[in-house]
Image (spheres, helix red, strand yellow):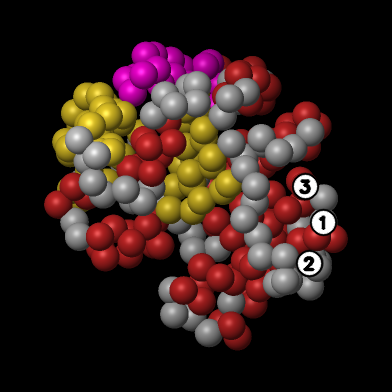
């Protein structure tokens, strides 16, 4: 699905150029659950901005489903982003003056659908994340875990090809973190959702299929976690 080849990224400040990503080669297959780890300043946020079509200023080739993203205009990138990517953030990024239903509907409204067309889709998305009946609640009345589930429902509402989750458990306690990662795992297994997750937490990263470590703008390692073997043992098949 996703193929990055010899990606380099520079930030310019005055006469200085900072080499943030260096010769990145990365493939993410459809249906994979991938974790990206790295210290602050390692380049992992820049990497997911490129993968998520948020940053189109880079050197190298990025192909998404065989389409060369590097050759697309900014407007085309925005169109691709709205149709193909769902974003989940550490701080949820919900609008507190809107109900759960209204928050989840935002991507659909941007896509040109009327509010009356979104009712069934919102109900389905809430069922998918275990929040049936929460349509008319406001974010401030929900727990952190519930707010994150709302943000996941919003990310899923347009049926994206993949999710980018940026520190999705960073603002949650350990038990709630386990519940959110379990939800991601179920989305990956039951819906074959491709998930790219940034995390500082090794225990969270180990729930993925692969852990990619970024160091000083390069991929330091790319290792499988034994995720599929654990599933086979769990299922007894």
Asked if labels 1 and 2 touch by Cβ distance under 8 angstroms, the answer is yes
User: Which disc, if any, is residue 138?
Assistant: 2
In the rendered view, does 59 fall on the left or right side of 100? Answer: left
Q: Position of residue 132 (x, y in %)?
A: 77, 62
**Which image quarter is the C terminus in?**
top right
- Would you call the spot at circle 3 few (<14 residues within 10 Å), some (14-19), or many (20 or more)? some
| Mark 3–mark 1 distance (CA, rounded to whole Å) | 7 Å
**Which image quarter is the N terminus in?**
top left
| Mark 3–mark 2 distance (CA, rounded to whole Å) | 12 Å
Q: Is residue 46 visible?
A: yes
Name the residue nearer the viewer: 144 or 86. Answer: 144
From what the image shows, is residue 161 above or below residue 16?
Answer: below
Q: How many marks?
A: 3
Query: Which residue is denoted by mark 3 in the rendering?
Result: 144
**In the image, residue 210 lies in the stretch drawn in magenta:** yes
Q: Which residue is at a point 68% across and 57% down the rendered structure image? A: 150
Judged from the image, the secondary structure of the residue bearing numbered disc 3 is helix
From what the image shows, is residue 6 above or below residue 97?
Answer: above
Name the residue nearer the viewer: 91 or 189. Answer: 91
Q: Is residue 210 visible?
A: no
Asked if labels 1 and 3 touch by Cβ distance under 8 angstroms, the answer is yes
- Would you call the spot at circle 1 few (<14 residues within 10 Å), some (14-19), or many (20 or more)? some
Q: Position of residue 63 (x, y in %)?
A: 22, 43
Span shown in magenta: 208-228
Q: Which residue is at a point 23% across and 46% down the rendered structure image? A: 57
Residue sitting at the far right? 141
Query: Which residue is denoted by mark 1 in the rendering?
Result: 142
User: Which disc, if any, is residue 155?
Assistant: none
| Helix, strand or loop: magenta stretch | strand
């Amino acid at each position: 699905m996703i193929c990055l080849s010899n990606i380099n990224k520079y930030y310019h400040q005055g006469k200085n150029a900072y080499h943030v990503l260096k010769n990145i080669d990365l493939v993410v297959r459809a249906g994979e659950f991938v974790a990206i780890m790295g210290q602050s300043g390692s380049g992992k946020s820049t990497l997911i901005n490129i993968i998520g079509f948020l940053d189109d200023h880079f050197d190298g080739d990025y192909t998404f489903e065989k389409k060369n993203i590097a050759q697309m205009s900014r407007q085309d990138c925005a169109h691709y982003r709205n149709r193909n990517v769902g974003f989940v953030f550490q701080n949820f990024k919900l609008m507190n003056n809107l109900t759960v239903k209204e928050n989840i509907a935002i991507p659909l409204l941007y896509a040109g659908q009327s509010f009356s067309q979104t009712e069934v889709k919102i109900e389905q998305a809430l069922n998918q994340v275990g929040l049936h009946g929460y349509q008319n609640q406001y974010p401030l009345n929900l727990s952190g875990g519930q707010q994150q589930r709302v943000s996941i429902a919003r990310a899923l509402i347009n049926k994206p090809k993949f999710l980018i989750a940026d520190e999705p458990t960073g603002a949650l306690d350990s038990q709630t973190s386990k519940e959110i990662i379990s939800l991601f795992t179920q989305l990956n297994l039951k819906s074959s959702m491709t998930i790219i997750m940034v995390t500082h937490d090794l225990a969270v990263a180990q729930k993925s299929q692969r852990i990619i470590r970024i160091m000083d703008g390069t991929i330091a390692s790319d290792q499988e976690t034994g995720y599929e073997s654990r599933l086979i043992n769990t299922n007894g098949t």
